[in-house]
Amino acid sequence: MNNKRYFAVSMALLVICMAVAFISAYNAIRTLSYSQANTAKIQAWIINPEKVKAMDIPVNVYYKAESIQGQCIEGWIHNNLTTPGLNNWLRHRLFNSSFTAGPACYIAIGTGTDDADPTNNEDLVNQIDCKQATEWIPGSGQFGLNATFTFTSSYTIKEAGVKTGSSGYLVFYVNDLNLSVDNSWTLTLCWIITISEA
C-alpha cells in the first residue's frame, strides 16, 4: 500500500513539474517571438521606410545604435510636443503670414538631463549635434524624419528633438533615451509625426 501511495505521489509531482516547465517554456518562446517580430519591424522600417506604411505599436520615435563590431541597441519611445514649440512655432507657422522661421526638419541629439517635464523645454539641455533630416511620407496624415549620427567620442545620449535648425525652435522632444555610444558608433533616429482629427 505504501509503495502504491509513494508511486502515486511521485507521479503527481512529476506531472506538476512537467506542467510548470511547459508553461515557462511557452511564455519564454512567446516573449522571444514577440521581441523578434518587433525588432524585425524596426529594422525593416529603418532600412526600407518606404515599404512600411503603418506601425501597430503606440510610439513614434525609433532608434538604432550600432558599432563597427556589430553591437546593436535599438528600441522605440514616444515623443512630446513642447509648449514653446506649440505656442512659438506651430501656431505662427500655420496662421501668421509674417512668420519667417522655417520648417521643423532637423533632428538634434544631446547628453543633458532636463527637469523631468519634457513639454517645457525651449532647447536641448546639452546639444552635441544637429543635422537636417531626410524627409518622407509614412502614410496618411503622417510625416517622417530620419537622421544618422556618427560619433568620434564616447557619449551617453539622453535627449533628442525635432527643431527648425541647430539653434532654432524645439518642437518635439524626448528625454529618456539613455544610449551609451563609443567612438565609430552610429545612431539612427527615425521620427514619425502624425496629425490626427480631434
Image (spheres, rainbow, N blue to C red):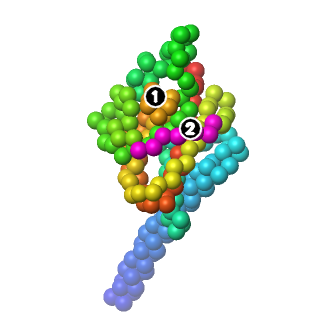
Taking depth in this image into account, of 132 and 14 the one nearest to the observer is 132
Q: Amino acid at mark 2?
A: Gln
Q: Residue at x 61, y 32 (%)?
A: 143
Residues packed near mark 1 inside 10 Å, few (<14), some (14 to 19) or many (20 plus): some
- Whether residue 104 is in magenta: the answer is no
Give the mark, 1 or 2, whose residue is nearer the N terminus.
Answer: 2
Q: Which residue is mark 2?
A: 132
Residue 104 location (% of width, % of height): 53, 29
Residue 181 location (% of width, % of height): 43, 57
Q: Amino acid at mark 1?
A: Gly
Query: Is residue 104 shown to the viewer in this render?
Result: yes
Farthest residue, direction right: 51
- Whether residue 129 is in magenta: the answer is yes
Q: Secondary structure at mark 1?
A: loop
What is the C-alpha distance between the residues marked 1 and 2? 12 Å
Q: Main secondary structure of the magenta part?
A: strand
Query: Is residue 31 shown to the viewer in this render?
Result: no
Q: Which residue is mark 1?
A: 168
Q: Residue at x 38, y 28 (%)?
A: 122
Q: Secondary structure at mark 2?
A: strand
Q: Is residue 24 above or below residue 40?
A: below
Taking depth in this image into account, of 171 and 131 the one nearest to the observer is 131
Farthest residue, direction left: 115
Look at the image and give the residue range highlighted in magenta: 128-135
